[in-house]
Image (spheres, rainbow, N blue to C red):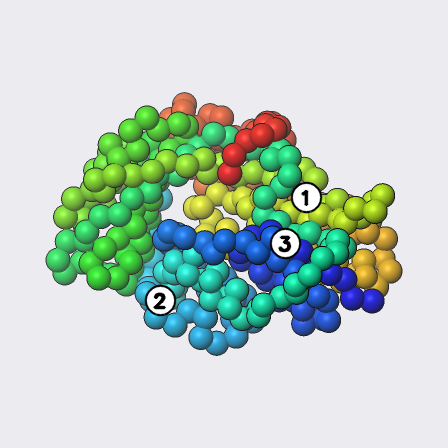
Amino acid sequence: MSEVLALTGYGLAELTCARLLAGRGHRIRFAPEPAAPTGPRPLLLTGPTLELLHSLWGDGLLDGTWRLSHREVSWGEEPAARLAQPARVVDGAVLATRIRGRLGPGLRGSGSPAWTVSAVPPDGAHWHCGRRQLLAGTAPLRPGADERTARLATAALGWVQLTPLGGGDCLVQGMVPGPAGDPAALLARLLAESGLDRLLRRPPRTATAIPAAPRLHPAPGRPPADGAGGLLTVGAGALRCDPLSGTGTAQALRTGILAAAVIDAAAAGTPAGALCAHYAARLGAAFAEHLRGCDRLYAVAFPDPAWSDETGRPASAHWSNRAGAGT
């Protein structure tokens, strides 16, 4: 039996879930039709993510995006290592719009959906691991700089990465262990201390700071009950990875894949409550493994006491249930 699925946004996870379910005969409704994403959102997509995107959406999705060939990493006291790592730099908003175009118009008309899939949970409650902030701005590369290599290095207070965008521009991102009063000044400090400032004509003139600690929604699945449809939270609303990992987009896609499997199995008769519990358990296991990896990396590079709330303790000790926290 097919189900009606309602989407509430244009996120990669929501659209992936819709694509898979439409291919299995389920009906898709945009409820309400979401506004198209706006504003550039640069994403660095590496091998596993590229393979997953291609397997889901086929050829042509990344046409015209900037290609990178290598990554250079200088982590803590370790010598710099240059690695072959094919990657693409894409605008997440453009990517989502291209994917939306492949779904078609969806359904029109009234009627309650059997399930709603959203990247924004209704209660906004998450378990957060730490308080770290991601700083981001753009800056021009020096003439002759390699525009096919992403570079990551550490300073005393955090890490910084340069991602060439093509045309001589570069995305500059840094991670610090707490709120940043002057993001541009702090980003300039990270660049100078890491030595990556040598590759830029100047540091970013302006920068933004956004919460970036890993987080998990404790109840990302709610089965249908009392005449109300079920709800599955996907993407960053369900599970957000530390951006250092480079797996955030892939994890978002996987939540869409898992959500599609939940809805398809429920339509085939498997109890929805058990499926939602399984969905939560899968995401919780992925989150715990991600935290263990972050702890190993950060403990090596950042002895500064400011990082004590970010590393070195069991995953459960990091989590604070912060109802109403923003994305």
Task: Name the residue: 39% across, 58% down.
Answer: 91
Question: Left of 29 or right of it: where is 69?
Answer: left
Q: Residue furthest front?
A: 109
Is residue 182 in view from this perspective? yes
Q: Which of the two discs, 3 and 2, labels the residue nearer the N terminus? A: 3
Depth order, front residue of 204/113: 113
Within 10 Å of disc 2 (Cα), the crowding (few <14, some 14-19, many 20+) is some
Count of all numbered marks drawn on residues in the image = 3
Identify the amino acid type marked 3.
Ala
Task: Name the residue: 68% across, 44% down.
Answer: 220
Q: Which residue has dot 1 on it?
A: 220
Q: Which residue has dot 2 on it?
A: 65
Depth order, front residue of 282/261: 261
Question: Left of 99 or right of it: where is 267?
Answer: right
Q: Which residue has dot 3 on it?
A: 31
Task: Name the residue: 61% across, 28% down.
Answer: 323
Kindly identify which numbered label has been placed on residue 132: none
Under tag 3, what secondary structure?
Answer: loop
> Eyeballing the image, is 152 above or below 190?
below
Identify the amino acid type marked 2.
Thr
Q: Quadrant of residue 194?
A: top left
Q: Which of the two discs, 1 and 2, labels the residue nearer the N terminus? A: 2
Task: Name the residue: 46% across, 38% down.
Answer: 212
Is residue 290 in view from this perspective? no
Q: CA distance from mark 1 to mark 3?
A: 19 Å
Question: Left of 89 or right of it: where is 242?
Answer: right
